[in-house]
Every structure is written in structure tokens, then in C-alpha cells.
Image (tube, rainbow, N blue to C red):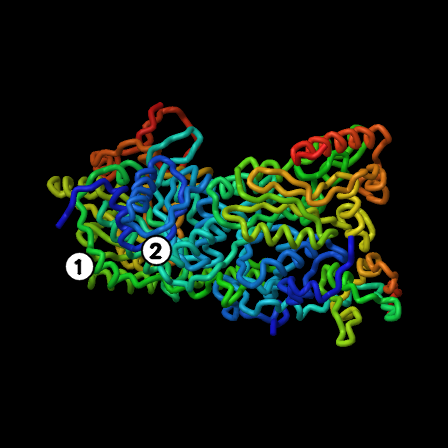
Amino acid sequence: MKKGIEVSIAASIAAQLARVEVVAAYPITPQTHIVEHLSELVADGKLDAVYINVESEHSAMSACCGSSAAGARTFTSTSSQGMELMHEILFIASGMRLPIVMAAVNRALSSPLSIWGDHSDIMAARDTGWIMLFCENGQEVVDSTIMAFRIAEDRRVLLPIMVNLDGFSLSHVIEPIEFPSQEEVDAFLPPYNPLYTLHPDKPLTMGAYAMPELYTEAKYAQEMALINSKDVIVEIMNDFTKAFGRRYMPVETYNADNADFVYIALGSIGENIKTAIHDMKGQGKEAGLVSLRLFRPFPADELLSVLKDKKRIAVIERAMPGGAANAPLFQEIASLMYTNGINVKIENYILGLGGRDVLPETFIDIYDGVAHTGSTVPVKEKNYDVIGVRG
Amino acid sequence: MAKPMDQYKWHELNVGCVIEEVGNASEYLTGDWRSSKPVWTDEKCIKCGLCWLYCPDAAVFRKDDGLFTANLNYCKGCGICAKECKPGAIKMVEEER
Amino acid sequence: MRLKSLELYTDHPEEEFAVSGHRACQGCAEILALRLALKVFGRDTILVMATGCMEIISTPLPTTTWKLPWIHVAFENAAAVASGIEGALRILTEKNKIPRKDIHVVAIAGDGGTSDIGLQALSGALERGHKFTYICVDNEAYMNTGIQRSSSTPYGAATTTSPSGKNSIGQKTWKKNMPRIAAAHNIPYVATACPSYPFDLFSKVKKARMADGPSYLHILSVCPTGWRIPSDQAIRYGRLAVETGVFPLYEIVNGKYSLTYNPEPLRHMVDYFNGQGRYRHLTVKTISKIQERVNLDWKRLKYLCGLK
């Protein structure tokens, strides 16, 4: 039975169904509805958890580390500036292998200040060692949040995980969502059984420092855990299908089998692209969408099998390169193609920054090869196009 | 028993580098640090225990006869015990090396 | 002070929770303060430590000096991590996932990790009222990174980032009054302590543990390395700090001040400054300015304690 509900609220209901035990969060637009609703659920006794009103995002992630280390199922959420403020602790959370789940409501980074959505905050966090899932619609947000706890807490994984949803364009829209029952979620998601926990009955030391003789080995162990988590993620996605019927994969495609040209994208912009693809079919134009549901660990094998025979690839991004030759996702796709000896033209389009609307027409223009940077002011030759710049 | 650092293989480290063997710092013998060591004159000792109380390294211990002495495996020779001993029962003596 | 025999120490067990083998400097009063405090906290304790001297000297992978559950996350968030642990213990106990036991969370940070970079997290944790103890082990500078100044460095003291020189008397600002800041959060128990007065310290740790809410302990930790004094003088200088009124020993119980040790008549500051390399450069003028301030602060404290 689908329910029409705001996606932020749905995300907090997913955390409630997952029986989170500690929430330590600091409000920031556009994540506020998630934490407000969780707060209400705790206040009304509908969620048996402790809600810690921390005084900053840095303390939010710190408190989450403490709570997860003490053995509680821990959840938080943030965006943009908040993600940046907690940045140093993100690395620590993954290094200490604490299975914290975070709903990352993607929002543009200051300066200038913008409360609207894009991917600059998540691109700045891609090397933090967290598992990262992207969601295109509200149902995916709910399902990914529930799966996230199971993935993170799996003894073979034990890594923190970010469930990404676009700020405003996904967090604040009302969508039809089917919620599993509490019994169904309980059957899918067992209680958190920590490998190590802080308790006087079995004292241990967490967070020791490593001399040069050991740091490399410690980091290698962590990296291998992240890479190996992919198999567990696929396994859990399959279990989810068995339990709830909905299918999830690290890389999902739409009409890609019929097309020589594909767009690659992350998050809810995929829906705009799907609309464009559908409209283009009527015009006899075949294009496909390759959507990365799993961004970290990078699903190289799955992407390769989809992309290897394509004649033209357009990487759609929502973050500026910051001086790099290309925007972040392009770099990863290009490196994947190159290391596998595949020489195909990859185009790089940056759009939808700071919440700017992107209509399906733009993607048709990209297909037709007429979408370029709007500006006529001469600048240095670039390998990417920022669509719709006025100037 | 902790191995020397550079003998650990990456898969031998615990998840998250957690240390389960609590108190294994005692494998490191800080006694090598000192250049002088405390020597007790038992006749002067009033068994007050302040030397035991004030040792930052917990290196002073009470013997079975109630008198005190230093665990030379760990004593760093800081001299606090000698300084604080009220009856002057402890003297710092240079180590012969 | 009457000396007590070891038998009377059995209140505070002979068990060591910070074992020998740690890498603290010879004569470090900070590790001594923790060694003593942990004897009173006992086994049912979870320690959260900030980056700093105590964390570094105690946990070089793969060894640890701590026999209690211990976690280090970062420099400025000991209080925030402690908040998370305290919250987790509450919910796990309520859900019967861990047996009902009185486990006390203790956050420990230096003066840097408390009054500077850690102030936000501390203020937040105190305001939220978590049941935990926060200990500031104050050696009056960022000692671990090489003796740089903090807001806890006393006026006139030389550090590597507040050196004395032609245009500088050393630290130009007065020590931040952290106990008063903690008390401003309306917490049940605040106290100052010094390992040179171990029984006073024991009693305060006990009270801190029993407080019905957050408790804050500010422990003066004499640092021979950073203060440039011989390694056997830490206890002596701690005593001098108290006897000159530089570091008074007092408690603030539910907002009410009381002295736990009255060293009057106060010794002259010169007794304290003499022999400390970090004060070697002080002029007569600076010393008298500091003496004036110490006298004033002492008068104010006595007034708050209801003494004349």
C-alpha cells in the first residue's frame, strides 16, 4: 500500500523501522525535516532511542562515534556545511570501522552560500572511506536506509555508510512510498551485534595511534575492507529483493541495451534523464541511462560490463572540478576506461549547481550535441561544459 | 604478547586497530631511560607509602616486609620519590653503565 | 598534613589502571594525576581521551597502558564522544541489551583540548546534562606538540608561541577560568585539584563520580619538561602553586563555592616563579603585577566561598 509522503519524513520512518538506538544530529537545511521528525518520534515514545541535540555537526559525528563504539545502532544526517564541519571525523569513523548510517542530503557548498541541492558536498567527501549509496526517488531512500544498517553492521563490512538524496528536489518532495512492516524489517535486519564494544567487562583500547611502521598496514586493511564490501552489498541487495520484491543493483540502467549513447549520473537527476530518454524515443533517438546506485566502493566491474560497448558516453555531474581537468565522476569513469584499454569519447557536462533546475530538454540537447556552456566570454579551453551559464 | 611494530602483517591487525590486550604497555621496559636510580635506607623508612603514591610510573612497590623499593624495569629515575620522602630515606644514586 | 599509612590507602586500591611502561616524561605529574584518579573511578569506567600528551604516551599501536575501556577519536571532541557513549549506555541498558550496571563515562583532555579547541564540545555536553565526568588535565600549554601557548597558559609564562623577547613579556593574557565557565553551565559539581594533594584529589574524584549530572574536574598537572624544572620537582611546584594562591583548591557544589584547603597566609609569588625556566625572564614589575592579580583573585574567591 503506497503512501504519499515527504521523502525526508520517509527517511526518518525508515530509521525508525530500523530501530535506531542513538541519533546525534545538528539541524541544517535541507536535512531538518529528517531530524525534526526523528525527534518527534522519540518524544512521542514511537521510537525507543536517545536523541542527542549536539551543538554542531562535528560533535554530531563525534557523538555517533562514541555511541557506535559503545554498541548502539547509530544514525545521523547532514548536508553541505555540516558535512564539511564533520569532515575530519568522517575519516576517523571509517578508520575505526564504526557502522554509522548517515542520510546525506546533498546540498551545494558555500561560498556563495546556497541552501539548494547539488553534489559538491558529497564529492568533497568521496575519499573518506565511507560506503556511499545514491537514491533517485523516495522509495529508494527508504529501502537504501534499511539496507544500509544491514550492510554497515555486517561483520564482513563494519564500515560507516552514507545514503545520499538530493536536497529539496528529493528531500522535500512528496512521493508514493511503500513502507515495509516492522515485522518485515525485523526479519531482514537483526539487532546490532558489535564485534568490539566499550564495556568494563571486556576492556579494550580504540583509537590508538600508529607509527610509520604500522600506518600503511592499517590503511591497507581498511581499504581492503571497503573494496571487499561490494560483494556483501550485492548479497544484501539480493536478500532485500527476496524479502521485499524491489530490485537493487550497484549499477542500474535504463534503456542502455538499446543505445550506443549513454548518460552516466548520480541521484535524482536520473529521473529527468529518463524523461528525456523516453521523449527522445518518440523522435527516433536512442539513449540510455547508467545510474550509479553504489558510488563507493566504486563498482568498476559492473560499470565496465555496461559501458564497454558504448560509442558515446556523457557524464552528468553536479559539482565543479575545482581546478581539475574534469569534474569528479568523469575522472573516475575515464580512469576506468583507460585502465581497461577502452578508447571511447567521454563528454563531461556540469549542470544543476546550487539547485538550478534542469529540464529534460537539456538532455535532448546534449544528445543532439548542441548543449554547451552558455557563455560567450572567452576563457581557457576546458574538457567539460557547464550547461546554462549566462554570460 | 605484542610483536615489534614492523613485524605485523596487515591482516594481523584487529578491525579498526582495536587493542584487545589491555595493559600490554608493560612489555616496554622504561627502566632503560634512567640515569640515576632511587635507593632506600630501610632504617629510615616509616612505611608511609608516599613514594608509592607519588610515582608517575607506578614503579615503586611495597615489599612483603612492608618496606618499599623501585621496580627497576620501569623506574625512569625522575627522583620524585627521593624528593618527597619526609624522613629522607631515599637517595638518588647515579647508575653505573 | 598528617601522613597516613598504606593500609588507609586501601580505599583506593593498589590496582593500577594506568600500567607502567607508558612513555610519559620522567616526573610527569599529569599521568600521576590520572593514575590516582582512576584508582577512585575504579573498574566500571569508560575513558574517552582527547589527542594530547596522555593519549600519545599511552597508546602507541599495538600497545596500550590502559586497563579500562578506552577510546580516542580526535583532539577537540572528548566531551562529544563521551555524550554519545553516555547516550548509548542509557538506551542499551533500557533495552536490556547490556546488564544494568553503574558504568561511569570519564572524558579527559588537556588544557588545549578543553579551554581552546575543545570548548564547544565541552559546553554542549555540560549544557545537555549528560551524567559523566570531564577532567581537564592542565599543564598550561600545548605540551604534546612542543610547548605552545594555550588560553590556560598563565600571564607572563614563556612558551614557544608566546616567547619572551624585546617586545614580549611572554603570555600576554590571563589564564582562562575554566572552573567558573563549567560552573556557569549549572552543573552539580566542579572542583580544582592537584596530585600534590592526593587525598584532596581522591575525595573530589569520588564526589565527581557521584554527582547527579555532569561534573568537571580541573587538575593542575605540573610539567617538568614544559615548565623547565628538574624532573623531581613536580610535586613540589604543585604544592607551591596552591600555597601561593596561584591554583586554589576549591569545590563548587550546585553553584556554591567552598575552599577545600586554605593555605593562608599566601606565600609570595617569587617562591613559585623561582626555578621555573618558563618564568626566568620575568621582571620585578611583571612579578608585582601578577602578585596583585593573584591577591585580587584570591580575595574574590574567598568572598565567593563566604570567607573574609
Disc 1 residue type? Gly
Place of residue C28 in the rendered image (x, y in percent of width and height, measured from the top left):
73, 54
Looking at marks 2 and 1 on the same chain, the residue that comes earlier in the sequence is marked by: 1
Task: Tell us which disc is closer to us: 2 or 1.
Answer: 1
The C terminus of chain C sits in image quarter: top right
How far across and how far down the image is residue B92, in percent?
A: 87, 63
Does C25 sit above or below residue A114? Answer: below
User: Quadrant of residue A339 in the image?
Assistant: bottom left
Residue drawn 77% across the image and 61% down it: B50
Of residues A386 and C110, the one nearer the viewer is C110
- In the rendered structure, find residue C112 and report the number of the disc placed on it: none
Q: Amino acid at mark 2?
A: Ile
Q: Nearer the viewer, residue B86 or C169?
A: B86
Q: Quadrant of residue A138?
A: top left
Residue A102 visible to an observer of this rendering: yes
Determine crowd level at label 1: few under 14, some 14-19, many 20+ residues with C-alpha closer than 10 A: few
> What chain is tagged by disc 1?
A
Circle 2 Cα neighbour tier, 10 Å, few/some/many (<14 / 14–19 / ≥20): some
Q: How many marks?
A: 2
Q: Where in the figure is residue C67, as x and y percent of width and height?
A: 59, 65
Task: Please say if the residues under marks 2 and 1 sit with CB atoms less than 8 Å apart.
Answer: no
Which of the chains bears the disc numbered 2? A
As drawn, the label of residue A342 is: 2
Tag 1, which secondary structure? loop
Q: Is residue B7 above or below residue A265?
A: below
Which of A219/C133 is in front?
C133
Residue A245 marker: 1
Q: What whole-number distance in Å separates the C-alpha atoms at marks 2 and 1?
A: 36 Å
Q: Position of residue C95 (x, y in %)?
A: 35, 59
Q: Residue at x 52, y 50 (%)?
A: C132
Residue A338 seen in this snapshot? no
